[in-house]
Image: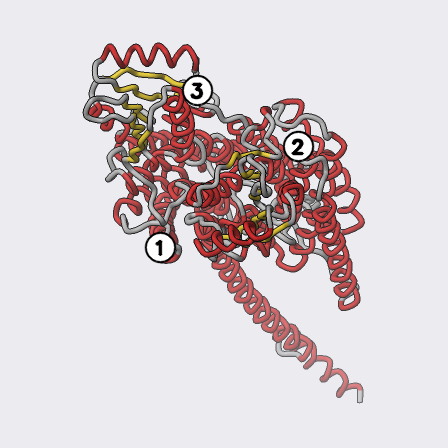
Amino acid sequence: MTSTLSASEERSDDSEQNGTGVDQVEPDRSDLERADLAKAELVKAEKRAKAERIGRIVAMFLFPFLLVTMMITGYLAAMHHTAPHNLPIAVAGPAAEAVRFAETLEAADPDAVDVRVVATGADAERLVLDREVSGAVALPQQGEAAPAKLYTAGAAGASQSGTVTQLLAPQLLGLGIEFSAEDLAPLPGNDSAGLAPMFMTTALMLAGYMPLSLMLSSAPHLLRLRRFLPLMVGWSASTAFLVWLVAGPLLGAVHGHTLDILGLGFLTVTAVGLVQLFFTRVFGPMAVLVGMLFVMVLGVPASNMGMSIYTLPSLYPWLHNFLPAPAIGESLRSVIYFGGNGVGEYVVVLLIGAAAGLGLTALLDLVKRRRDPDATGPEPTMFSLTGGKPARKPVLYTTLAFFPLAMLVLMLSTMLGAMYQPAPKDMPVAIVGGTAEQARMMVTGLEQNMTGLFDLRALDDAEAAREQVRDRDIVAAYVLPSAATPEATLITNGAAGMSQQQVVARVFAQVAAGSQLTLGTEDLAPLGVEDTTGTVSLYVAMGWIMSGFMIIVVAANAFPPAMRPRNLLPVVAGWSVVMSVVLWLIADPLVGAVDGHFPELVGTGIVAIFCTAMFTTVFVRLIGLLAVVPVIAVLMFLGVPASGGAMSIYMEPEIFRFLHEVLPMPAAVESARSILYFGGDTVGGHLVTFLIWGAISLVFVFIVDRLRPMPDLEEAGTAEEPAGASV
C-alpha cells in the first residue's frame, strides 16, 4: 500500500514536472478561451468604431445638408412669388352700393379677396383696428358729397397696407369713385418700418430653442426637469430683459410698454424652451432641425411680420393660428401699436404651448422611468465650446450662457439697428434736363427741400442716365419734360432693389405733382413673376453662405479629422460642388424661383461656399464652437443688411455702404442679382472679393495648423474622455 502510494505520488510529481497533469491542462484551456473572448471583443470594438466613424461622417454631411436645404426651400417656396389670396376686405355704405362694389371686387379677381359687407364706416374702422380685415372701403352715404374712405392700418404690416392700396385704389378709380386714403394706425417715427416686433420675435425665439442643443451635447444633466425648470425661469427673465433693453432704451425702436414686453418675452422664451425640451427628448441631437422647422422655416413666413400672410400660399394663414412666431409677433404688435387690443388670443397660444411642452416632457420621462428605473440620461459628447481641453463646470456653464446671449444681442442690435428707421440718405439720383444748366437749376431747387436725402446729379443726356441706372451707378433718373416729351419721366431699375425703387417713385411723384407735371415711369429691369419681391437673390446667397459655414461648424464636432488641411480641402471642395448644384435644383426646377442660369449660378456658388468655409475654419480652429458667434456676426448679422437684398443700403446707416463693398454676403447677393437680371455684368468683381477672403483665410488656416496642430485622434474622430471630464 505504501509502495503504491509512493508510486502514485511519484507519477503525480512527474506529471507536474512534465506539465501533463490535469491541473495544468485546465489553465491552458482557460487562457485559450480568454484569448478568443478578447479577440471577439476586439473585433466587436473595431466594428463599433467603424460604425461610429461612418455615422460621424454621415452626420457631418447630413446635418448641414438638411438644415440648409430646409431653410432655403422653405423661404423660397413661401416668398419668391407673392400675390393676394383671400385678403379680408370690409365694405361699408348704402346697402345696394356696398353690395355692388363688393361684387365688383370679387369679380375682378375672385381668389384675391374675401369681401364682407358691413353696415357703417365705424364698423369698417373697427374691423381694421381689430385686424379682422386687412383694409376697408367706406362708401359715402346717400346725399353726402364727401369722398369714399380707403382704410388701412400701417402698424398691422406695411406690406399688407401697400397690398390693400394697390388692390382697391384701381377699382375705386375705375368706377369713378373719388376717395381719400386714411391710415388708422400709422407706424411711429421711431419705428417707421414696423420691424421692431419682427426682430424682437426672432430674438426671443432664438433664446428659447438655441440653448437646448448646446446643453444636450455639453451638459445633458441640466435637461432634467427638476434642474431645467428653475434655469428656464432665470433664462427667460434675463433674455426678455435683454431684448427690451436693446430694442427700447439702447436703440429707441420701442417706447414704453415695458412691463408688457417683459411679460410677453418671458412667456415666449419659456413656451419655446419647453416645447424644444420635448423635441430634445424625442429626437435627441436632431431636435434642433425640428425646432428650426417650426420656429424659423415655417414660423417666420407665417408670422405676418415681414410679409402679409394673405400674399403667401394658403398654408401660412392656417399656420398663423398656432405657431409661436405668429403668437409672439402679433402679441408684441398688439401692445406696441394697438394698446393691447387682441393680445389675449395670442397669449393663449403661448400658454397652451408651454403647458403642452411641460406636460408631454413630464409624461415621457415618467414612461421611461417605469420602463427602466436604472436608466441614465444621455452622456455629454462635447466637453468644451472653445475647442480646447475639457472645461471645468463654471467655465462650461459660462460659455453655455454666453453663446446664445451673444447671438441674441448681436442679431437684434445689428439687424434691427440697421433697418428699423429706413430713410434715403444721399441716394444717388440723376436729374436730366434738355441742357446741363436746366438740370443744375432743378438740382439746386430740389436740394433746398430735400437736404441729405438724395445725391442729385445734373445730366443733359437721357441715354447716358439710362446707362447709369442700368449699371446700378445711380438708383434712378428724373427726366424733365421737353418739346419732344411733354411729360416728366422717372427711370428706375426694379431688379436693383424694390425698396429704393418705391422710395424714388413716391418722392418724385410728389415732385412732379408740385410742378403740375404728368409723370411717366420706365423700369429698365423689372422683376419677373418668379421673383415678385426681389428677394430671390438674397435667399440664393444665403444658401451659399450657410452651406459654407455649416459644413465646418458641424465637421469640427462630428468628425474632427476632416479639419486637418490634407482632408479639409478635398472635403470642402466636394461639398461646395454638391451644395451649389443642390441649391440650384431647389431654386429652379423644385420651387421655380429662377429660370435657368445653371453654369453661372453653380459656378459662383462653388466659389462662395468654398471661400466662406475657409473663413469659418480659421475661427473654428482658434475658438471651437464659439466661432459661430463672430462668423455669424460677420456673414449674416452684418452681411444681410449690407447686402442690399432686403433693404437698400442707401436707406441704412452709412457704415453698411462700406461693408457692401467688402463682405461676402453682399458679394453673393450682387452676384446672384447680376446673373439673374443683368447678364452677369458685375460677377467678376464679386468673385475677386470671395477669392480674397478665401485666399487670406486659407493662409491663416495653414498658419494656425502649424502653430496649433490638431491632437492625435482616434479614427472615429473623438479623443478618449479624460478622467473627471464628465459633468
Q: Which residue is mark 1?
A: 585
User: For the residues marked 2 and 3, what is the alpha-carbon distance in whole angstroms?
Assistant: 28 Å
| 611 vs 507, nearest the viewer | 507
Q: Which mark is residue 425?
A: 3
Determine whether, in the image, residue 68 is placed left or right of residue 132.
left
* SS for dot 3: loop
Q: Is residue 383 visible?
A: no
Q: Which mark is residue 448?
A: none
User: For the residues marked 1 and 2, what is the alpha-carbon distance in whole angstroms?
Assistant: 38 Å
* SS for dot 1: helix
Query: Of the residues shown, which amino acid type is indicated by label 2?
Result: Val
Q: Quadrant of the N terminus?
A: bottom right
- Whether residues under marks 1 and 3 lie with C-beta atoms below 8 angstroms apart, the answer is no
Query: Of the residues shown, which amino acid type is indicated by label 3?
Result: Lys
Q: Quadrant of the C terminus?
A: top right
User: For the residues marked 1 and 3, what is the alpha-carbon distance in whole angstroms?
Assistant: 38 Å
Q: Residues within 10 Å of mark 1 (few under 14, many from 20)?
A: some
